[in-house]
Amino acid sequence: MEDSNVTILSKEGDSFTITRQQAELSELLKPFIAEGSGDEPVPVPDVSSKVIKYIIQFMENYVADPMKDIEKPLKSTIMKEVVQEWYAEFVEGADKDMFELILGANFMDIKPLLELTCAYTASKIKGKSPEEIRKIFDVTNDFTPEEEAQIREENKWCEEY
Protein backbone atom coordinates (compact mmCIF):
# COMPACT_ATOMS: atom_id res chain seq x y z
CA MET A 1 0.00 0.00 0.00
CA GLU A 2 3.02 2.30 0.48
CA ASP A 3 3.45 2.97 -3.26
CA SER A 4 -0.28 3.08 -4.05
CA ASN A 5 -1.97 5.91 -5.86
CA VAL A 6 -5.11 7.86 -4.99
CA THR A 7 -7.59 9.09 -7.57
CA ILE A 8 -9.48 12.31 -6.94
CA LEU A 9 -12.48 13.64 -8.85
CA SER A 10 -12.85 17.36 -9.49
CA LYS A 11 -16.06 19.36 -9.40
CA GLU A 12 -16.41 18.73 -13.15
CA GLY A 13 -15.92 14.97 -12.69
CA ASP A 14 -12.38 14.87 -14.13
CA SER A 15 -10.14 12.31 -12.45
CA PHE A 16 -6.57 12.91 -11.32
CA THR A 17 -4.19 10.32 -9.92
CA ILE A 18 -1.71 11.30 -7.23
CA THR A 19 0.71 9.31 -5.13
CA ARG A 20 -0.07 8.29 -1.58
CA GLN A 21 2.71 10.58 -0.38
CA GLN A 22 1.11 13.53 -2.18
CA ALA A 23 -2.34 12.61 -0.86
CA GLU A 24 -1.00 12.59 2.70
CA LEU A 25 -0.50 16.38 2.43
CA SER A 26 -4.30 16.71 2.44
CA GLU A 27 -6.17 16.17 5.70
CA LEU A 28 -9.29 15.59 3.57
CA LEU A 29 -7.67 12.64 1.79
CA LYS A 30 -5.90 11.03 4.78
CA PRO A 31 -8.94 9.08 6.04
CA PHE A 32 -9.44 7.57 2.58
CA ILE A 33 -5.83 6.40 2.55
CA ALA A 34 -6.13 4.96 6.07
CA GLU A 35 -9.27 3.04 5.16
CA GLY A 36 -7.41 1.41 2.31
CA SER A 37 -9.99 2.46 -0.24
CA GLY A 38 -7.33 3.30 -2.81
CA ASP A 39 -9.42 1.88 -5.67
CA GLU A 40 -12.36 4.22 -5.08
CA PRO A 41 -12.02 7.75 -6.49
CA VAL A 42 -12.33 10.48 -3.85
CA PRO A 43 -14.68 13.28 -4.90
CA VAL A 44 -13.60 16.86 -4.18
CA PRO A 45 -16.81 18.57 -5.31
CA ASP A 46 -15.79 22.09 -4.30
CA VAL A 47 -12.55 22.14 -6.31
CA SER A 48 -12.34 22.72 -10.07
CA SER A 49 -10.05 20.79 -12.40
CA LYS A 50 -8.02 23.94 -13.04
CA VAL A 51 -7.35 24.34 -9.30
CA ILE A 52 -6.63 20.63 -8.80
CA LYS A 53 -3.89 20.94 -11.44
CA TYR A 54 -2.29 23.73 -9.37
CA ILE A 55 -2.69 21.65 -6.21
CA ILE A 56 -1.05 18.60 -7.80
CA GLN A 57 1.82 20.76 -9.06
CA PHE A 58 2.30 22.05 -5.49
CA MET A 59 2.09 18.51 -4.03
CA GLU A 60 4.65 17.12 -6.49
CA ASN A 61 7.14 19.83 -5.63
CA TYR A 62 6.41 19.72 -1.89
CA VAL A 63 7.09 15.97 -1.73
CA ALA A 64 10.40 16.46 -3.58
CA ASP A 65 11.46 19.68 -1.78
CA PRO A 66 9.30 20.63 1.24
CA MET A 67 8.66 24.32 1.71
CA LYS A 68 10.46 25.98 4.58
CA ASP A 69 8.33 27.50 7.34
CA ILE A 70 7.03 30.98 6.58
CA GLU A 71 8.06 33.51 9.22
CA LYS A 72 5.26 35.59 10.68
CA PRO A 73 4.92 38.46 10.40
CA LEU A 74 6.19 38.37 6.84
CA LYS A 75 9.75 39.63 6.69
CA SER A 76 9.28 40.92 3.14
CA THR A 77 6.66 41.58 0.48
CA ILE A 78 8.97 39.87 -2.02
CA MET A 79 7.99 36.21 -1.99
CA LYS A 80 11.47 35.00 -3.05
CA GLU A 81 12.70 36.40 0.27
CA VAL A 82 9.95 34.53 2.16
CA VAL A 83 9.99 31.06 0.54
CA GLN A 84 12.17 29.07 -1.84
CA GLU A 85 12.23 30.32 -5.43
CA TRP A 86 10.00 27.55 -6.82
CA TYR A 87 7.21 28.35 -4.34
CA ALA A 88 7.48 32.09 -5.01
CA GLU A 89 7.23 31.54 -8.74
CA PHE A 90 4.36 29.09 -8.24
CA VAL A 91 2.13 31.56 -6.38
CA GLU A 92 3.07 34.43 -8.66
CA GLY A 93 2.10 32.27 -11.64
CA ALA A 94 -1.23 31.37 -10.01
CA ASP A 95 -2.06 35.00 -9.18
CA LYS A 96 -5.19 35.25 -11.35
CA ASP A 97 -6.60 32.08 -9.75
CA MET A 98 -5.41 32.84 -6.20
CA PHE A 99 -8.82 33.13 -4.57
CA GLU A 100 -9.92 29.77 -6.01
CA LEU A 101 -6.59 28.22 -5.04
CA ILE A 102 -6.98 29.43 -1.44
CA LEU A 103 -10.49 27.94 -1.34
CA GLY A 104 -9.23 24.66 -2.82
CA ALA A 105 -6.35 24.43 -0.35
CA ASN A 106 -8.78 25.14 2.46
CA PHE A 107 -11.37 22.59 1.26
CA MET A 108 -8.73 19.88 0.84
CA ASP A 109 -7.07 21.01 4.09
CA ILE A 110 -3.55 21.28 2.71
CA LYS A 111 -1.92 23.40 5.38
CA PRO A 112 1.37 24.29 3.63
CA LEU A 113 -0.46 25.36 0.45
CA LEU A 114 -2.98 27.38 2.43
CA GLU A 115 -0.14 29.04 4.34
CA LEU A 116 1.70 29.84 1.10
CA THR A 117 -1.31 31.29 -0.71
CA CYS A 118 -2.36 33.37 2.29
CA ALA A 119 1.20 34.65 2.75
CA TYR A 120 1.26 35.65 -0.92
CA THR A 121 -2.02 37.50 -0.54
CA ALA A 122 -0.74 39.20 2.61
CA SER A 123 2.44 40.23 0.77
CA LYS A 124 0.32 41.93 -1.88
CA ILE A 125 -1.56 44.09 0.63
CA LYS A 126 1.12 44.68 3.28
CA GLY A 127 1.61 48.42 3.78
CA LYS A 128 -1.14 49.37 1.34
CA SER A 129 -3.99 51.80 1.96
CA PRO A 130 -7.61 50.61 1.79
CA GLU A 131 -7.92 52.35 -1.59
CA GLU A 132 -4.87 50.50 -2.96
CA ILE A 133 -6.19 47.19 -1.64
CA ARG A 134 -9.57 47.81 -3.28
CA LYS A 135 -7.78 48.43 -6.57
CA ILE A 136 -5.65 45.26 -6.26
CA PHE A 137 -8.72 43.08 -5.64
CA ASP A 138 -11.10 45.10 -7.82
CA VAL A 139 -13.45 45.85 -4.92
CA THR A 140 -15.90 48.73 -5.12
CA ASN A 141 -16.10 50.99 -2.09
CA ASP A 142 -19.77 50.91 -1.14
CA PHE A 143 -19.39 52.98 2.04
CA THR A 144 -20.64 56.53 2.19
CA PRO A 145 -18.02 59.07 3.29
CA GLU A 146 -19.81 59.26 6.67
CA GLU A 147 -19.74 55.47 7.14
CA GLU A 148 -16.09 55.32 6.18
CA ALA A 149 -15.21 58.10 8.64
CA GLN A 150 -17.10 56.28 11.41
CA ILE A 151 -15.31 52.99 10.68
CA ARG A 152 -11.92 54.74 10.65
CA GLU A 153 -12.71 56.37 13.99
CA GLU A 154 -13.87 53.11 15.59
CA ASN A 155 -10.75 51.30 14.38
CA LYS A 156 -8.15 53.99 14.97
CA TRP A 157 -6.19 51.56 17.13
CA CYS A 158 -5.41 49.46 14.02
CA GLU A 159 -3.29 52.23 12.57
CA GLU A 160 -0.81 51.76 15.41
CA TYR A 161 0.22 48.39 13.94
Image: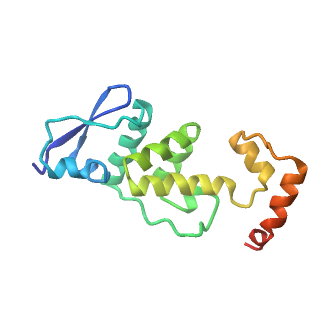
Q: Is residue 144 left or right of residue 139?
A: right
Residue 14 in percent (x, y) is at: 32, 26
Q: In terms of depth relative to the viewer, which is nearer, 50 or 32?
A: 32
Q: Is residue 108 left or right of residue 1?
A: right
Q: Is residue 97 above or below residue 108?
A: above
Residue 74, by quadrant, is: bottom right
Residue at 78% in and 69% down: 159
Residue 12, by quadrant, is: top left
Q: In terms of depth relative to the viewer, which is nearer, 119 or 134?
A: 134
- Image quadrant occupied by the C terminus: bottom right
Labels in figure, total: 0
Residue 126 in percent (x, y) is at: 69, 59
Residue at 21% in and 40% down: 6
Residue at 48% in and 42% down: 101
Residue 78 in percent (x, y) is at: 62, 57
Q: Residue furthest right?
A: 146
